[in-house]
Amino acid sequence: MGEKGAAEFVPRLEEVSSTVSKALLDSNPTMKEDCAIFVNELSKSLKAELGHHAKPILNSLVQNTKHQRSKIRKLSVRAIGELAKTNHAAPLLKDILPQLKPLLNDNIAEVRKELQMVVKEWLESLDMNMFECELALLLLAGLGDENEEIAQLCVKALEEHGKKILSEEPTVDVHSFDEKFKRKVAGA
């Protein structure tokens, strides 16, 4: 789906959001898979518009991360990853992140890997700084994964994030901060 095709949905995004969130909960596994793929593509195409209507879709996708079929869990994680990167959707992660933690112990390595790839992408995203600690903790948990590829993905993501932090953060003058703090306390 290109941006041109997705643009047709913009005037009716509230309806689309409601319909898709219900379709994601359909008992038919193929419907769940197709809807997750649709959300993934729609999120990429309508990054600026879709976030305002993301909550019901995210809630349905999170429910699907508990589905018995690993393909549905994996596609749901990918769709959550893309949808959360749309404008205005990132704050919704506050309620969603705790519900994704059980996937760290999923019995299928592909699902665990997909989760860690999404977490890595979120950590690289500027809009996700408010969840930096929670995301880093998810990656730290992945360091002990029995699958070496997943563990290495987490190591690389944490190393890259550490380098990014070191290159962006100005050096802190502890003495200057200490003096300002003392003056503030003395003045209070």
Image (cartoon, helix red, strand yellow):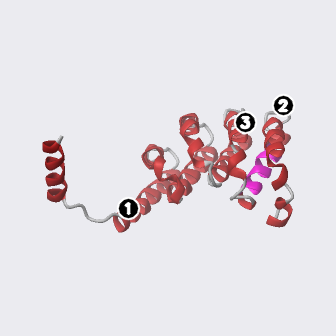
- Name above or below for residue 101 compared with residue 49: above
Q: Nearer the viewer, residue 50 or 116?
A: 50
Residue designated by label 3 = 60
Q: Residue at x 76, y 57 (%)?
A: 41
Callout 2: helix, strand or loop? loop
Q: Which image quadrant is residue 97 in?
A: top right
Residue designated by label 2 = 27
Pointer 2 local density, CA inside 10 Å: few below 14, some 14–19, many at least 20:
few
**Three-letter amino acid code at disc 1?**
Ile
**Magenta highlight range:** 33-43
Residue designated by label 1 = 165
**Three-letter amino acid code at disc 2?**
Ser
Callout 1: helix, strand or loop? helix
Residue 57: horizontal and vertical position, in percent?
Answer: 73, 41
Front of the two marks 1 and 2: 1
For marks 1 and 3, the one nearer the N-term is 3
Asked if residue 181 lies in the magenta stretch, the reply is: no
Q: Residue at x 86, y 35 (%)?
A: 28
Residue 106: horizontal and vertical position, in percent?
Answer: 59, 37
**Three-letter amino acid code at disc 3?**
Ser
Callout 3: helix, strand or loop? helix
Residue 88: horizontal and vertical position, in percent?
Answer: 62, 50
Pointer 3 local density, CA inside 10 Å: few below 14, some 14–19, many at least 20:
many
- Name above or below for residue 89 compared with residue 24: below
Q: Residue at x 60, y 45 (%)?
A: 109
For marks 1 and 2, the one nearer the N-term is 2
Prevailing SS of the magenta stretch: helix
Mark 2–mark 3 distance (CA, rounded to whole Å)? 12 Å
- Using the rendered image of the protein, determine whether residue 44 is visible from the camera's viewpoint: yes
